[in-house]
Amino acid sequence: MPNPTVAMETSQGTFTVEVFLDTMPVTASNFLDLCKTGFYEGVHFHRVIDGFMLQFGCPYAKDAKSQRAGTGGPVPGSKFSTPDGKTITRDSREGCIPDEFTQKFSNEPGTFSMANTGQPNSGGSQFFVNTVHNDFLDWWRSDLSESQHPVFGKVISGMDVVNKIGKTKCDRNDNPATPIKMVSTKVQG
């Protein structure tokens, strides 16, 4: 069975991501659950750095200029299921999920990678789309940095939209000057 895809319609255009449910079942199931429940709709990209990545997924970023953007996550204690029927409960404090350091997918252009605080098990709803090869963020590359960001998907169409968002003018906090909003997330498969 092929992996599911998500058509991500933004105010700048649509791109589609293949979600690696077959090899990253916890992280992928978390993301798919949030897409299916409409969690991301109306949320703005809160951090865009040309030549690096686009960060997205904080519920506080429904307000495009929120000072809290980048600090939020899913509802604490909420649940989702993996393909094998296992129920995962997001932590009761911040809605975080367990780290999934199982596959050595590099943070190449177009890949979706789990954002976190740098602490173990601190990922939740926020992710970033790499616009260049950021191998120093690979979870197994401790020789390059302490950052550990597992890849759980890849853009399969609309990379031109991703690159357009990546070139948007931003303020000194890397927040787009003209807000870029997620209109819808449609899961297929």
Image (cartoon, rainbow, N blue to C red):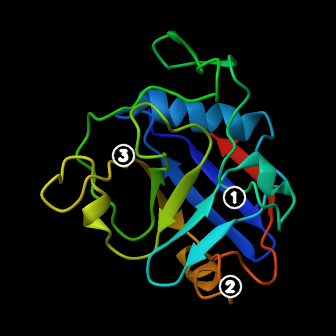
Residue in the foreground of this view, choosing between 53 and 103: 53
Residue in the foreground of this view, choosing between 150 and 19: 150
**Label 3: which secondary element:** loop
Please provide percent x and percent y for residue 62: 85, 55
Residue 184 appears in the figure: no
Which of the two discs, 1 and 3, sits closer to the camera?
3
Q: Which amino acid does label 3 sit on?
A: Pro
Q: How crowded is mark 1: few (under 14 residues within 10 Å), some or many (20 or more)?
A: many
Residue at image position (64%, 23%) is 93
Residue at image position (75%, 63%) is 9
Q: Residues within 10 Å of mark 2 (few under 14, many from 20)?
A: some
Which of the two discs, 1 and 2, sits closer to the camera?
2
Q: For this view, does 165 lie left or right of residue 2?
A: right
Q: Which sits earlier in the primary sequence, circle 1 or circle 2?
A: 1
Q: In terms of image quadrants, where is residue 31?
A: top right
**Label 1: which secondary element:** strand
Asked if 13 appears above or below 106 in the picture, the reply is: below
**Label 2: which secondary element:** loop
Q: What residue type is labelled 2?
A: Cys
Q: Name the quarter where the N terminus is drawn.
A: top left
- Please name the residue that numbered disc 1 is placed on: 8
Q: Name the quarter where the C terminus is drawn.
A: top right
State the CA–CA distance, disc 2 to disc 3: 26 Å
Q: Which amino acid does label 1 sit on?
A: Met
Check residue 150 in the rendering and tell me which mark sits there, or answer none. 3
Q: Which sits earlier in the primary sequence, circle 1 or circle 3?
A: 1
Residue at image position (58%, 31%) is 30
State the CA–CA distance, disc 1 to disc 2: 21 Å
Q: How crowded is mark 3: few (under 14 residues within 10 Å), some or many (20 or more)?
A: many
Asked if 114 appears above or below 56 in the picture, the reply is: above
Residue 3 appears in the figure: yes
- Please name the residue that numbered disc 2 is placed on: 170
